[in-house]
Amino acid sequence: MIAETNWKQVKAMAYEVAVLPWGATEAHNWHLPYATDNIQVTAIAEEAGRLAWEAGAKVAVLPTIPFGVQTGQLDIPFCINMNPSTQMAVLEDVIDSLVGVGVPKLVVLNGHGGNDFKQMLRELQGRHPEIFLSAVSWFQVERGEAIFDVVGDHADERETSLILHLTPEWVLPKEEWGSGTDHGWAIPAMREKWAWAQRAWTQATEDTGSGDPRQATAEKGARYFEVLAGKIGGYFRDLAAADPQALYLK
């Protein structure tokens, strides 16, 4: 954890992978904190990094970027928007800093559904061939259907369970939780998901939640967290050991 270490330790270490957690600051139903995405992605990065380190990978976890793309929630107070063009500039500055000291690989660990780094990394990889760039969105690693009753996509049973496990003191009492009811698109192509447009969250949901959270428990969150950290930590380990010139099966 680079935020917790010091120059003496860093100077003596040849790091193989840097991890940049990237979250958001936004409403999560009535009951979860605005920092939900940051709490989750930071904790997952820390634990996955620990597991990879104990397996021999020299992984450096950077401080979390706390703002994400919020262009569909600008009418909700304190949903702080960082436009994709701004993210691109920030990301390139981070990459320049890593390249300058010889860090060979970077993983952007994404914790917010509104962020999408694929096209940015396509462009930045072309500009910076000396560092291998990749991205992981933790919520796409494992949906948790064997753990949860209802898998939604925002402030749902999964996210509520994770926060009950990680920071239960920041969750409102259960009687104050919203239902997470969302409203499907009126246009069939949108409902069938072969056409896409950004959701206007105050129109598409009742409480900014998408997915019923009411079966969430801290125990489910602990099980899910362990699965996520194990899988992502395995990726960090494998990436650290990989030769960027030999990444394809023959």
Image (cartoon, grey):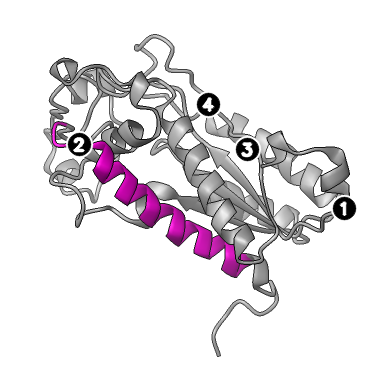
The main secondary structure of the magenta stretch is helix
First of labels 1, 4 by sequence position: 1
- Residue farthest toward the bottom in the current orientation of the protein: 250
The front one of 187 and 232 is: 232
Q: Residue 92's spot in the image, x, y percent? A: 71, 41
Which residue in the protein does label 4 denote? 67
- Between the C-alphas of marks 3 and 2, the distance is 35 Å
User: Which callout, 4 or 3, points to the residue nearer the camera?
Assistant: 4
Instruction: Please state which amino acid type lies under the numbered disc 1.
Output: Ala
Q: Amino acid at mark 4?
A: Phe
Q: Which residue is mark 1?
A: 12
The earlier-in-sequence mark between 2 and 1 is 1
Q: SS for tag 3?
A: helix
Question: Magenta segment, which residues?
Answer: 214-239
Q: Which residue is mark 3?
A: 88
59, above or below 91, in the image: below
Mark-to-mark CA distance, 4 and 3: 13 Å
Q: Which residue is mark 2?
A: 216
Badge 1 density bin: few <14, some 14–19, many ≥20, Cα 10 Å = few
Q: Between tags 1 and 4, which lies in front?
A: 1
Please, what is the three-letter code of the amino acid marked with disc 2? Ala
Label located before the other in sequence (2 or 4): 4
Q: CA distance from mark 2 to mark 1?
A: 44 Å
Query: In terms of secondary structure, where does tag 2 sit?
Result: loop
